[in-house]
Image: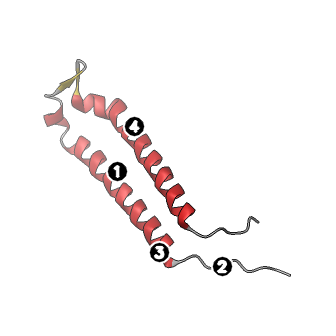
Amino acid sequence: MLKTRPRQPASHWQSTRRLTLGLLLIWFVLTFSVIFFARELSRISLFGWPLSFYMAAQGLALIYLLIVAIYTWQMKKTDQRQPDREQQ
């Protein structure tokens, strides 16, 4: 016989969507602001390089990795709050 999987509460999907939309908003704002304010950021120097160059070359990549790490960490916490399910 086939066992039916219990339905997951809507709160799990709401928190997943909220987390995803929040992190995508942070991603968009950071990417857009670095590109839009590149001239102003180039006046600031970081380790001998203009800040706009540093952010485009290395800084945003590190921030993107941080966003992925936050997503993974938060999703693990969200999934642990769910009742145990059978593995298929």
Q: CA distance from mark 4 to mark 3?
A: 31 Å
Q: Which residue is mark 2?
A: 6
Q: Which residue is mark 3?
A: 11
The type of residue carrying mark 4 is Ala
Q: Residue furthest right?
A: 1
The type of residue carrying mark 3 is Ser
The type of residue carrying mark 2 is Pro
Which is more foreground, mark 4 or mark 3? Answer: 3
Q: Residues within 10 Å of mark 4 (few under 14, many from 20)?
A: few
Q: Residues within 10 Å of mark 1 (few under 14, many from 20)?
A: some
Give coordinates of residue 62: x percent, y percent: 39, 36
Q: CA distance from mark 1 to mark 4?
A: 11 Å
Between discs 4 and 2, the one toward the N terminus: 2
Depth check: give the residue in front, 48 or 35: 48
| Secondary structure of residue under mark 2 | loop
Q: Residues within 10 Å of mark 2 (few under 14, many from 20)?
A: few
